[in-house]
Amino acid sequence: MEFFEVRGGKPLQGTVAIHSAKNAVLPIMAASILADGQVTIMDCPRIADADNMLDIVRTLGCRAERVGENAVIDTAGMQDWVMPEALAKKLRSSIFMMGPILGRFRKATVTHPGGCEIGLRPINLHLNGLRAMGVTFHEEGGLIHCDGSGMRGGEIHFDYPSVGATENVMMAAVLTPGTTWIHNAAREPEIVDLQRFMNAMGAKVSGAGTHSIHIEGVQKLRGVNYRPIPDRIVAGTLLAAAAITGGEITLDNAHAGDLVAVISKLRDMGCEIRHGLTNINLRAPKRLRSFGQLQTLPYPGFPTDMQVQMLALSIKAMGTTVITENVFENRFAHAGDFNRMGADIVLHDRTAVIRGVEKLHGASVVARDLRGGAGLVLAGLAAEGTTIVERVDLIDRGYAALEQMLASLGADIRRLCDTA
Ligand code: UD1
């Protein structure tokens, strides 16, 4: 098993480019199966979730492969509407395939994704949205059989602005006759990117980024070359790494406009941040100060995917910090690991109270989920001595070689293999 060995204490310095966003690439790959022709996803990040998604698309009969820095998906030969169960279980995003498979075949069989490390993650909103478009469901032995023979445009009001459910309905609706409205839609930048991608293929989608999305069904979509937006969470994680080590870094291919909530908290901690259209520069103070309180919310609120990184920063900041996690229930799973490194974190249900300490010390810790793993690496960068972070495979789901990005900025971090 691979693990990271981190020796803390080096301030990060330098410039690094941000790769395309996992959460944009995955739905774009799913939506690619709607095209008649070839889709090229440019600068496709080398992350495990993207590879799994390519496997899923390939199992449906598409050609799906990496060509240099790009991923190419060609739907000629696609004929299957049954999602491969073993692959679907590997990644929650496989549920995104339900919408496009239904859009294409008017039927689909998918696996119930079940729970995962960060929470229960039900799919009721996905099903309700598709139901409003005339899809019926029949569940048997962990499989969901979807019948879309009566599919038509529909009007959907989500009880909660779920990112995945919004994307699923968008993808189901673009090839469905009639008009679909999605109200209380999620507004994340990745939803806007999905709209831009599908419109480039010839779809008629408008309103993404606002509460209401409007889709006019079309008959056909064409192949396209497309570059997804940069990953705001990878960018935020690297800014946090510079902040926690007292460094100064510049990110290229990073959109400050997608990171307003994160940048605001980093400034509250004493970081100086300047940005252009596609770059961000952060200079950290000698010692961070607490930003007081933070709560995670749907976009444009503070992103849950950056919560644990901000918690890691708070550990060494001056003062007390209160963080409330409103989106996923199990996102404080690493509090015990941080405490073993010398942190002072107390949990009360969905709230963490962090009293800043002056020093952290290295320890051997185990990642339990993707972002939590990144948070442990951040703590390791700021700790005295050596930190071992196990279950690097979880971190590889969303960061293309995080250790190389950090090492290029001067961090002392190595990927090692435990052969025992
Ligand atoms: C997406 C992101 C993930 C991010 C999350 C919130 C991708 C691939 N993943 O996940 O990185 O952390 O948005 O920004 O884009 N919910 C229901 N019923 C449903 C669907 C969701 O109750 O049918 C709940 C979830 O349990 C959770 C909340 O809604 O508590 C938010 O989930 P959602 O916005 O759907 O997140 P994902 O699309 O799974």
Image (spheres, grey):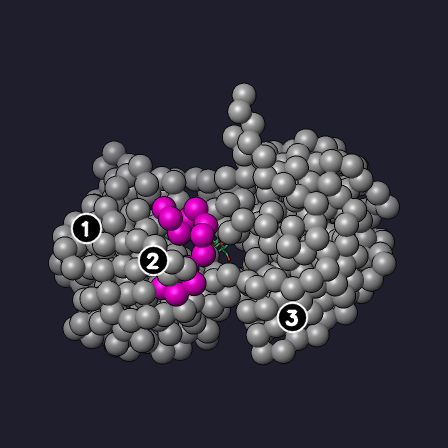
Residue at point 34%, 55% (across, down): 66
Dot 3 corresponds to which residue? 280
Verify whether residue 46 appears in magenta.
Answer: yes
Per the model, the C-alpha gap separating discs 2 and 3 is: 29 Å
SS under mark 1: loop
Query: Can you say which quadrant of the picture contains the C terminus?
Result: top right
Q: What residue appears at the point 34 percent right and 57 percent down from the top-left corner?
A: 67
Residue 229 in the image: state x and y as whole percent.
47, 68
Q: In the rendered structure, which disc, 3 or 1, sits on the residue that comes first in sequence?
A: 1
Q: Is residue 323 visible?
A: no
Q: Nearer the viewer, residue 312 or 410?
A: 410
The magenta segment: 41-52
- Residue 118 falls left or right of residue 407: left
Checking the image for residue 67, the label placed there is 2
Give how far across and how far down residue 107 sits, in percent.
17, 53
Query: Secondary structure beneath disc 3?
Result: strand
- Asked whether disc 2 touches disc 3, contact meaning CB atoms under 8 Å apart, the reply is no
* Residue 131 picture quarter: bottom left
358 or 276, nearer to the observer? 276
Q: Is residue 336 above or below residue 402?
A: above
Q: Amino acid at mark 3?
A: Ile
Q: Earlier in the sequence, mark 2 or mark 1?
A: 1
- Where does the image place residue 14, in percent across and percent down from the top left? 69, 62
Residue occupying the far top of the picture: 420
**What residue is rendered at 28% in x and 39% in y?**
85
Q: Is residue 112 left or right of residue 241?
A: left
